Amino acid sequence: MNSSSIKIKDYKLYKAKAKLKKPIADATHTLHEISFLVLRLRLENGIVGESYLLSFQYSPEAIKGALKDLLPEVKKFHVNETGKLYKHLDHLSEYFGNQGINRWAQALINVAMWDAWGKYLNQPIHKILGTYRDKCAIYGSGGWISYSIDELIGEVTDYASRGFKAVKIKVGSPDWKTDVFRLQKVREAVGNDINIMMDANQGMDLPSAIQLAKSAENLGVYWFEEPLNHQNFDGYEMLKRSTGISLAMGEREYDTLPLLQLLQKKAIDIWQPDLLRIGGLEMWRESAALAQSYHIPVLPHYYKDYDVPLVCSIPNGVGVESFDWIDPLIDNPMSVKDGFAIPHQGAGWGFNFLDDCLTEIKW
C-alpha cells in the first residue's frame, strides 16, 4: 500500500432535499424540510468517500460552521486513520464541548472516511468489520401525529404491502387517549401479524406515559420509544416497574454514559444509537458492545443504509428503522423483501448520492 495515495486531499460539502408535501410533526417538533448535508472526501489516489447527515431545517449555519472549523484538519491524515483523526478532532472541540454540533461534524467525517477506506479495499463495510448475519429485520417508521387517520392508515398499510413486518407510529398527543385511538386504528388496519411500536419523542410526562403503556398492552404494542426526557433515568425506571412495557432509547445520546445509567437501573430493553449523533462507526460499535455485555439488543435510529451493514456486523443487532426519504436521491436504494434488508454489496457503504440532487455549499 502506497501510504501517500490514501492521504485525504480535499473535500466538498453539499445540501440535498427530499420532497415533503406538507409539514409533519411528532410530539415535540414540526418539520418543514427534510434535508441532508452530504460530505465528499477525495483521496490523493482519486477515490471519493461519501457520507450524509439528516439536518431538517435546524441550525443550518451551526453545523456548517462546525464543519468549516474541523474539515481542514482532515488533510493531515490518511483515510485509514479514523481513530487518530477522531481523537484529534475531539481535542480541538473540547473547549466548546465534545457533544452536540461538533460530534455530528466528527461523525460525518468518520463515516466518509470509512466509505473511502472500503472503496480502497474494494470491500463492503460489513465484510471489513466481520459478518454475523447476511440480512436483518427492518421496520417502517413514520405515523406522524400531524397525520389524519386516513394518512396514518395509508402509510402503515403501504408498509405492510411492501413486505414490512413491523411499523412504528408517533404518540404523545395532548390527550393520551387520542394515541390509544390511533393505535387501535393501526391494529385494525394491519392485523395481528404486524408488530406495532410507538414513539413519543420525549414528549410525555410520567403519569401519561404509564396510562398509555397500560392501555397499549391490549393492542400488543411491541415497545415504547422515548416516552420521557432522555435524561430522566429515574422516570424510565419507574415506568418500567409500573408497566413492564419494553423501553427503547438511545437516539439522543452522544456517548455511552446514559446507556450505562439505564442498564444499571434495568430501565432499557432496546438500544437505539444514532450513528451521526454518537460520533461515527467506532463509537456506535462501542455502545453496541456495552449493550451486548448486558444482553440488550441493538436496533439503531434512522440511517438504514449505514445501519444495515453495521447491524449485520454485531452479535446483538436485531433490526433497523426505515424511512424512504433518501431513496430517490441515491443510486442504489436499500432492497427490502419479506421484512428483511440486505446490506449493500458494493465497496464501502455501497451507495452514493446522485450528482443532480446535490447543491454545493460554498463558505
Image: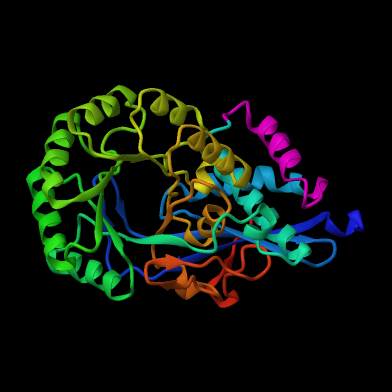
Which residue is at 23% across, 25% downward?
238
In this picture, residue 259 sits left or right of residue 39: left
Q: Main secondary structure of the magenta part?
A: helix
Coloring scheme used: rainbow
Inspect this view and state whether residue 39 appears: no
Picture quarter with the N terminus? bottom right
Nearest the eye: 137 or 254: 137
Q: Residue 95, how many percent across, how many down?
A: 62, 26
Vertical comparison of 335 with 1: above or below: below
The stretch in magenta equals 75-97
Nearest the eye: 314 or 331: 314
Inspect this view and state whether residue 186 appears: yes
Which residue is at 62% across, 63% downward?
349
Which residue is at 18% across, 33% downward?
243
Which residue is at 46% across, 46% downward?
59
In this picture, residue 203 sits left or right of residue 32: left
Query: Is 18 colored magenta in this rendering?
Result: no
In this picture, residue 114 sits left or right of residue 354: right
Tell me which corner region of the image, top left, top right, bottom left or bottom right, holds residue 7.
Answer: bottom right
